[in-house]
Amino acid sequence: MIPSAFEYYAPGSVAEAIALLKTHGDEAKILSGGHSLIPLMKLRFASPAVIIDINGIPGLDYVKEEGGFLKIGALAREASLESSPVVQQKFPLIADVVKVIADPQVRNRATVAGNLAHGDPANDHPAVMLALGAEVELTGPGGSRTLPVSEFFVDLLETALTPEEVLTEIRVPVPPAGSGGAYYKIERKVGDFATIAVGSQVTLDSGGRVTAAGIGLTNAATTPIKATDAEAYLVGKSLDDATLEEAGRLAMAMSDPSSDSRAPAAYKKAMVKELTIRTLKRAAERARGGQA
Amino acid sequence: MSTHTVTLTVNGQEHTAQVESRLLLTHLIRDVLRLTGTHFGCDTTNCGACTVLLDGAAVKSCTLFAVQANGKSITTVEGMAQNGGLHPLQAAFREHHGLQCGFCTPGMLLSALDFLKKNPDPTEEEIRWGISGNLCRCTGYLSIVKAIKAAAKEMAAGGK
């Protein structure tokens, strides 16, 4: 399948990329990993007149811990999360999710930032970043602004990015001691989009009570969902069976999946509840110092 | 700016070509450079038949534009054999019946090559995850997994 013709630019800096965006407006699309954009262009679901390839911009491919944050640059590939010691040690939720995103070749190209910027609720990082309370740095002609990820997803394939902005960095707060996270994804086959997936992150005090909880739902509505009702309910509670059941129910109540070729909506809703319970259990085990 | 001059190194040899910006890397490799060992299968980033190494990392060449390879180094299956001798992975695929029809083989070999570089002594399960981006419709994967396991031993012994 051959995409429509387009003008191609490969700027050498973020400033140049933004200048090109300013010139071409919403005619232009940023190309980073390209593993959402190029398939859409091949299917001609997207036919941007201008492609701005940012892969040649130096210094954007970092994954590093700095100032209490895990910082992920615009060009950090999924594969670089797999090989990052800080991710593997301090972010079991991210370590979980990266294993179930597409396949090794795709992870060598696809970027974490692109996974968010595409605004697809079926992508896996949005739910994870919602659970972890991450923020994003958006850079445009007037400089940079920072937005909580919870304010980033506007609608299906629509984000808070203006046509002149680039998502330049993701910042994930480093969880305090006594934290753990987990991601479960139901998929028909390796590399598929989630039928349903849930990511949970908890912090426990020494008595085993929840001091902070984050829960994100993948492919459970037209936008990624932060299950705030379940999160708020969990704070101050011990994760006994009745509490987990109620948290699962509250997360399910916030989901609004539609029936499709993967599963009927009723099944997806039931799985939101079940996966919320399972991920909370696993996250709590890890928070208590079980296997990361 | 919809036509570009790209210069890239393929299997150690430099090539320059005029390409339309929408030309896919796989078509540059197959149709312009005439290196038809790289197969073109599903065209939807699923099957992995078009896998090549881009600066050493396995990628699906149906999901990159040729212009993106400007200044890069590419390895295709034609670049695996050295000095007339098969690469240990190729030899192991032959020895252990890692192929039947052969359509998935070039992509499978290059995925395995990238995988073994990252994980030189893998378990069977790790191998299966390592080739999860490549579909084979003949072998049921058993013999492919066996071949990669054997090649890993051979490469470790040979220091490759």
Image (spheres, rainbow, N blue to C red):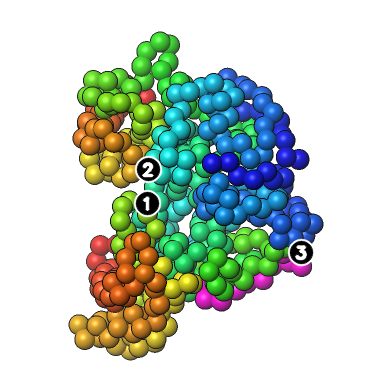
- Residue farthest to the right, as pictured: A23
* Circle 3 Cα neighbour tier, 10 Å, few/some/many (<14 / 14–19 / ≥20): some
Horizontal relation, residue A251 to residue A113: left or right: left
The vertical placement of A78 against B118, above or below, is below
Q: Mark 2 to mark 1: distance in Å? A: 8 Å
Give the amino acid type for the residue marked by disc 1 in the picture: Gly
Q: Secondary structure at mark 2?
A: loop
Circles 1, 3 touching at the beta carbon (< 8 Å)? no
The residue that label 1 is drawn on is A191
Q: Mark 1 to mark 3: distance in Å? A: 37 Å
Q: Main secondary structure of the magenta part?
A: strand
The residue that appears at 22% across and 37% down in the rendered structure is: B140
Horizontal relation, residue B71 to residue A68: left or right: right
- Residue A174, given in percent of the width and then of the height, sits at 45, 69
> Reading the chain from its start, which is encountered first: label 1 or label 3?
3
Q: Is residue A147 magenta?
A: yes
Circles 2, 1 touching at the beta carbon (< 8 Å)? yes
Image quarter hosting the N terminus of chain A: top right
Give the amino acid type for the residue marked by disc 3 in the picture: Pro
